[in-house]
Amino acid sequence: MSERLSATLVKSLPGCVQCPRYDAEQHGAGIIHIGIGAFHRGHQAVFTDDALAQSGGDWRIIGVSLRSQTVKEQLNPQDGFFTLIEKSTGKSTARVIGSIKEVIAAREEPQKLSEALADPSIKIVTMTVTEKGYHYDQSSQSIDWESADIQHDLVFPNEPKSMPGLLVKACLKRMKSEYSHSSKLSIISCDNLPENGAIVKSVVLGLASRVDKKLVTWIQNNVSFCSSMVDRIVPKVTVADGQALTQQYGYEDQGLIVTEPFKQWVIEDNFCTERPDWESAGVLFVKQVSDYEKLKLRTLNGSHSALAYMGVLLGHKWIHQAVIDPLLVTVIQRLMQKETGPTIPTFPNVDLAEYQQQIIQRFENSDIAYATQQVASDGSQKLQQRILQAMEELYRENKEQHTACLMATLVCWLRYLKGSDEKGVTYIINDPIADLLHALVNEHWEQPIDLVDALFKQTSIFPTSLKTTPNFTKRLIDGIHKITELGTHAYLSQILQDAE
């Protein structure tokens, strides 16, 4: 049996595996990351590893798993070390990351987590909790007071379940401690939400106002909230990936991550604390992140979602299969070039056409097998910023003729919510309101007018400006009729034909 990765084993790994260029155990923790899934380990942990190698400092990461002990069981026995495999065009490189100190399971170790978050040596909190983890209602632009976790945290503020609840408790402990005036905290959101730092601030202050009025003022004076844009494709690791690692390099790693070479991180420079030397690792610090967020959300993420829903319906299991479908790549090219592209600001250092082509090439990377079903998850949360905000902007500017593929994405998403493709192959719908959406679609699919009316009334997915625009409603209803009548392939073909 192969030896499992650990601090001891790292010192004797073969030269073909790049190991940390610093002694990890000589560096303390200064960052807590909430939501330590694969993406964080393939992205922020890597940038921090590079910064530690370049400039040192007590900037290792304490990871927090909100739902399960899986990542804790993967990484803690390995002293936090894990292997990152980068794959592209048939080539791969292996690298051990040492920036994670340990993982805390929030539900099983609440006291340990509470003490860690309140520790003044922790200067930064980062997070990847997915869109639903913010408990933010896009329609009211405030905290979702109806959320079960938020309601729990209001009643039991010392036993929080939600990300906002954890941060409010941490801030309360810091405020009441003897180091209250020297316990500042910088919080960075790393999720695919526009103005994500402002959203964190909104939900944290909203919840804090119900817990302790003095806390709101303390947070405003001692905590900064930074938006950020993150980009890297990090698919789910397979059993075969783990077996290949052991076969090629001779050791076992239960925390293995597989990713593409490309990575990008843009952070709003709004810190009230020290921070790692992330610049040396390639992080871009800017005054305002919103334009970069729009670039990525509407170009990469919007296209990803379109490929996912259309791909599932047409029987494509993987994104790299969907993007080489001549029909779907044409849809994606039109969506980026003719529809979302004109809504994106210009950047002095970004060639938009080149960026769009690079995205297609990244999707084509078959070495990084990203399941269409994985990308299709949480559509009720993702499509608001990836598709609907661009549509809202285009309708407002009387450019609805440039929304054909955006509308087709919505229509394909609704067809996807039936829970089976056109060959009758069933799949699980992963969404915070999956049961409601599935029930509405199946009940009203043959009466699209009733379906759209029910979606508008019973969900907060669609912005008010679009719900009250008759032509948007009409085109959505027409789309449902056409995809039912023609099937997905013929429907999309007609969309492209009519858009010319």
Image (cartoon, helix red, strand yellow):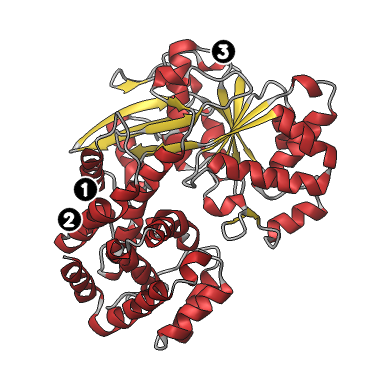
Position above or below: 141 against 494: above
Q: Quadrant of residue 158?
A: top right
Q: How many marks?
A: 3
Q: Quadrant of residue 186?
A: top right
**Closer-to-camera residue (275/43):** 275
- Residue type of the residue flagged with mark 2: Ile
Position above or below: 208 against 30: below
Instruction: Choose the circle earlier in sequence order: 1 or 2.
Output: 2
Please state if 369 lies on the left or on the right of 431 as rendered.
left
Please state if 33 lies on the left or on the right of 372 as rendered.
right
Quarter of the image that includes the N terminus: top left
Q: Which residue is mark 1?
A: 364
Q: Which residue is mark 2?
A: 324
Q: Are there few (<14), some (14-19), or many (20+) residues within 10 Å of tag 3? A: few
Instruction: Answer yes or no: is residue 410 visible.
Output: yes
Instruction: Answer yes or no: is residue 255 visible.
Output: no
Position above or below: 465 against 135: below
Q: Nearer the viewer, mark 2 or mark 3?
A: 2
- Name the residue rendered at 44%, 68% in the picture: 428
**Closer-to-camera residue (211/396):** 396
Q: Quadrant of residue 85?
A: top left
Instruction: Choose the circle earlier in sequence order: 3 or 1.
Output: 3
Quarter of the image that includes the C terminus: bottom left
Q: Tell which residue pokes out farthest to the front in this image.
A: 398
Q: Which residue is mark 3?
A: 26
**Closer-to-camera residue (197/156):** 197
Please state if 179 lies on the left or on the right of 305 as rendered.
right
- Residue type of the residue flagged with mark 3: Gln
Q: Position of residue 50 (x, y in %)?
A: 42, 20
Is there CB contact under 8 Å for labels 1 and 2?
A: yes
The Cα atoms of the two marked residues, 3 and 1, are separated by: 41 Å
